[in-house]
Image: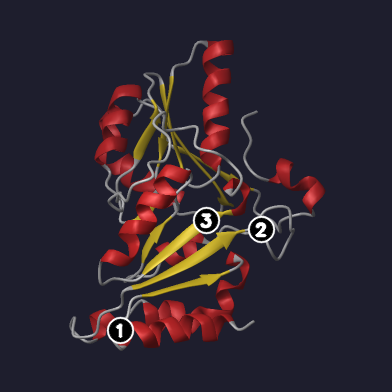
Amino acid sequence: ISEAAIVGTGVGYALEGGKALVELMYCDFLGRAGDEVFNQMAKWQSMSGGYCKMPLVLRVSVGNKYGAQHSQDWTALCAHIPGLKVVFPATPYDAKGMMATAPSGHAPVVFFESQRLYTVPETVYPEGVPEEYYRIPLGEPHVAKEGSDLTILTFGATLYRALDAAKQLEAEYGISTEVIDGRSLVPFDYDKLLQSVKKTGRLILASDACERGSYMHTIASRISTMAFDHLDAPAVVLGAENWIVPPAEMEDEFFPQAF
């Protein structure tokens, strides 16, 4: 397996006028294609003044129960690079709709998927997953659960743990919790999150990425600036421990949990 060859071939095919969809089995080996993703895939369209198009979708799966070299969330690395769109659907409905949208434009998209969710049926959208073709715009968060006292924003599989936490908070403490699935890191429309924070006054941002350097800090900083007068407390970022992912037997305790 050569991750550099996989992405490099996709880049070349896209530059020649094709639409490419390629896959890296594990997020952890993204570094093996670092130049191809961060310098070639991300920049050719801009460097050519739009003459060269880059309709390339790179699927990247975040592992589960495979330990230190197979279970890391590296969304922040990609979100940091200008020129890349970065999405991370957490439900079957969103995965289908966003995968339909991702290759429809001319810009490169890194499409993260969580192996934790491959066997999880649709439970967030009551209508389920339509059989017909549909698209979901990239950049629009989805309110998975409405609430009035606390907002929780998540990316990826943490959505389901946030929904579990919301149930416990309401049952045990009477705290009405709004849960928002970010779905897309870049682009990210702040409107729904701002509306929620203005309503609740408190914000938790959670993902399986290591807390140090998490893209959640960028969103927390922006919200603190845009909604400073509406926050009753500082936004709080939750993530995995700032350490190496442990063996499978300890992973459940390593990543954020409801309680």
Please say if the residues under marks 1 and 2 sit with CB atoms less than 8 Å apart. Answer: no
Q: Tell me: residue 223, above or below residue 60.
A: above
Q: Nearer the viewer, residue 130 or 238?
A: 130
Please tell me which residue is depicted at 26% across the width and 31% down the height of the picture: 195
Q: Which mark is residue 97?
A: none
Q: Count every numbered label the image shows and give the total.
A: 3
Give the Cα separation between the discs numbered 1 and 2.
30 Å
Residue beneath disc 1: 44
Left/right placement of residue 212 relative to residue 255 reads left
Q: Position of residue 158 (x, y in %)?
A: 55, 41
Under mark 3, the amino acid is Glu
Q: Quadrant of residue 172?
A: top right
Q: Which secondary structure, mark 3?
A: strand
Q: Amino acid at mark 2?
A: Ser
Q: Which residue is mark 2?
A: 71
Q: Does dot 2 land on a helix, a strand or a loop?
A: loop
Q: Which amino acid, mark 1? A: Trp
- Where is residue 67 shown, x and y percent of the image? 74, 58
